[in-house]
Image (spheres, grey):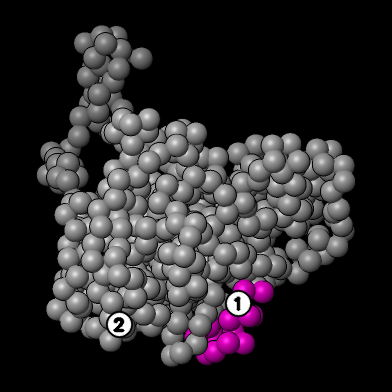
């Protein structure tokens, strides 16, 4: 090595050693080329994100379906078949749990990212069930890509999910209200670093088999009463591996090409919702993944600078499935009316949803986390017959105002809600196809939501069909 200040010759290039570190002298002609790298470049393509802003079931599928009509790629980034999205096309009602709703667009590629946990029997059963309903899903395997880094949900994960719920009920007298689809246990395996991924299944099956047996034994040790047929499930998985192999891709490279290549419209379909987020939701009554905007980056391998518009989907009232705090819940005739008129049953579990007034403190909190560009307000028509409509605008605990949405669920259970009351419009909104065609009382309701959140409402839903989503701007 040349001493400090001395000259050396490396590959024909003269270098000067500074503090013992050789510095390469670049040819003069490369300077202009290198300086161009230092000019910040705006991303070629950005992803548009659709997220739930409450406790799920807001009608995200309908908004995604609307945007997916001219999308090139539609992605799922987190969750599993615990999600449930209903989309109505040509009077056919399709139910999706793992497949992105955009799979109905035959010109788009659907992508299941690394942040999703996949139950393979559930995936193929879902496709076959929807194929029987109509022509929308024909050729789905030709337009679906799955990240090689996505984790797999096994049958024993689902069995463990059920056992854990039973144990919670016995020990504490309350459960979490999970869908028992194995999502939590699968994410637990991922975090414990003994989970298995899609790339493992489509590689050397003997190696996969050994790892699978070890994982199954791990759960059998923890839950001796667990009923696991290891050989039968391995046989099933071997068959799925062959069907899966043509769909599997390097997800990071796939997204990088899409983001940096020719102009493309890329849509991300969030599952679950902000208040079910593992970090920001009403913990512990939450799901096991990040269903806020950060999950888009980690669940797809998308850099933050490539996240474009983020649309929050808000129901005109509030619903929640399962247990947990619900400040604006109406356990009365109002709640029953919203439940029956809104057909509030979970798509995944069939459970009745609890119903209550729109809670804007909750939605504002979701906006703080996600930074919504605009809002889609859905199911406004369900409020059509109410003589008056209330909106939660402030929380008080022990007579004192709460400045923010509380992290502690014991505090949230004690919240008293301050409401603003609006006169109802007492007429049908279902035929409206523009903001001006809505009753003045409904227009005032929408304007108040915009003013409170300081976020514009871009769409208003007044029915089940694609056409019933009124675009405001």
Query: Can the viewer see residue 70 in this picture?
Result: no
Q: What kind of secondary structure does the magenta stretch mostly adopt?
A: helix
Comparing labels 2 and 1, the label whose residue is closer to the camera: 2
Q: Is residue 317 visible?
A: yes
Q: Tell me if residue 128 is in the magenta stretch.
A: yes
Question: Whole-percent x and y of residue 120?
Answer: 67, 65
Query: In the rendered view, would you say 406 is above or below 83?
Result: above
Is 170 magenta? The answer is no
> Are the residues at dot 2 and dot 1 in contact (C-beta closer than 8 Å)?
no
Q: Which residues are magenta?
A: 125-139
Task: Please tell me which residue lies in front, 345 or 139.
Answer: 345
Q: Residue at label 2?
A: 428
Is 315 placed above or below 6 here?
A: below
Bin the neighbour count of mark 2 within 10 Å (Cα to Cα): few under 14, some 14-19, many 20 and up. Answer: some
Q: Residue at x 51, y 40 (%)?
A: 283
Q: Position of residue 232 (x, y in %)?
A: 86, 62
* Image quarter of the N terminus: top left
Residue 417, position as x, y percentages in the image: 35, 45
| Quarter of image, res 334 | bottom left
In the drawing, does residue 243 fall left or right of residue 213?
A: left
**Residue at image location 29% in from the left, 9% down from the top:** 3
What residue is at 57 percent from the left and 49 percent from the top?
323
Element carrying mark 2: loop
Q: Nearer the viewer, residue 378 or 92?
A: 378
**What residue do we see at 37% from left, 73% from top?**
382
Q: Using the image, tell me which numbered label, if any, was put on residue 409.
A: none
Q: Earlier in the sequence, mark 2 or mark 1?
A: 1
Provide the secondary structure element on which disc 1 rests.
helix
Query: Where, by quadrant of the figure, is residue 19 drawn?
Result: top left
> Which of these two is toward me, 239 or 48?
48
Residue holding disc 1: 127
């Amino acid at each position: 090595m040349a001493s400090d200040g001395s000259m050396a010759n490396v590959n024909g290039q003269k270098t000067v050693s500074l503090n013992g570190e050789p510095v390469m002298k670049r040819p003069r002609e490369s300077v202009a080329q290198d300086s161009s790298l230092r000019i910040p470049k705006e991303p070629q393509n950005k992803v548009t994100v659709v997220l739930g802003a409450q406790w799920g079931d807001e009608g995200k599928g309908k908004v995604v379906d609307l945007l997916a009509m001219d999308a090139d790629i539609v992605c799922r980034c987190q969750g599993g078949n615990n999600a449930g999205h209903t989309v109505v096309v040509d009077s056919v009602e399709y139910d999706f749990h793992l497949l992105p709703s955009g799979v109905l667009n035959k010109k788009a590629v659907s992508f299941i990212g690394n942040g999703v946990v996949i139950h393979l029997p559930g995936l193929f059963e879902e496709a076959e069930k929807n194929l029987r309903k109509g022509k929308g899903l024909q050729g789905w395997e030709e337009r679906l890509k799955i990240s090689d880094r996505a984790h797999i949900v096994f049958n024993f994960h689902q069995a463990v999910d059920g056992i854990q719920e039973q144990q919670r009920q016995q020990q504490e007298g309350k459960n979490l209200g999970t869908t028992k689809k194995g999502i939590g246990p699968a994410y637990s395996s991922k975090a414990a670093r003994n989970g298995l991924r899609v790339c493992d299944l489509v590689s050397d099956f003997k190696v996969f088999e050994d790892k699978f047996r070890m994982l199954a034994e791990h759960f059998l040790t923890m839950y001796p009463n667990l009923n696991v047929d290891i050989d039968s499930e391995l046989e099933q998985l071997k068959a799925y591996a062959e069907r899966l192999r043509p769909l599997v891709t390097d997800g990071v490279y796939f997204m990088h090409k899409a983001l940096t290549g020719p102009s493309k419209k890329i849509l991300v379909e969030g599952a679950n919702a902000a208040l079910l987020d593992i970090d920001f939701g009403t913990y512990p009554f939450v799901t096991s993944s990040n269903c806020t905007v950060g999950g888009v980056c980690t669940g797809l391998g998308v850099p933050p600078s490539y996240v474009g518009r983020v649309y929050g989907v808000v129901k005109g009232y509030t619903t929640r499935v399962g247990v947990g705090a619900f400040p604006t819940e109406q356990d009365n005739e109002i709640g029953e009316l919203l439940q029956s008129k809104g057909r509030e049953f979970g798509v995944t579990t069939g459970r009745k949803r609890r119903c209550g007034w729109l809670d804007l403190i909750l939605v504002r909190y979701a906006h703080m986390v996600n930074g919504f560009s605009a809002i889609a307000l859905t199911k406004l028509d369900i409020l059509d017959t109410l003589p008056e409509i209330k909106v939660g605008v402030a929380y008080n605990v022990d007579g004192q105002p709460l400045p923010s949405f509380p992290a502690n669920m014991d505090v949230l259970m004690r919240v008293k809600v301050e409401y603003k009351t609006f006169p109802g419009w007492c007429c049908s909104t279902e035929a409206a196809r523009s903001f001006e065609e809505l009753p003045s009382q409904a227009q005032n309701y929408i304007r108040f939501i915009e003013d409170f959140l300081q976020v514009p409402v871009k769409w208003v839903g007044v029915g089940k069909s694609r056409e019933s989503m009124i675009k405001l701007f």
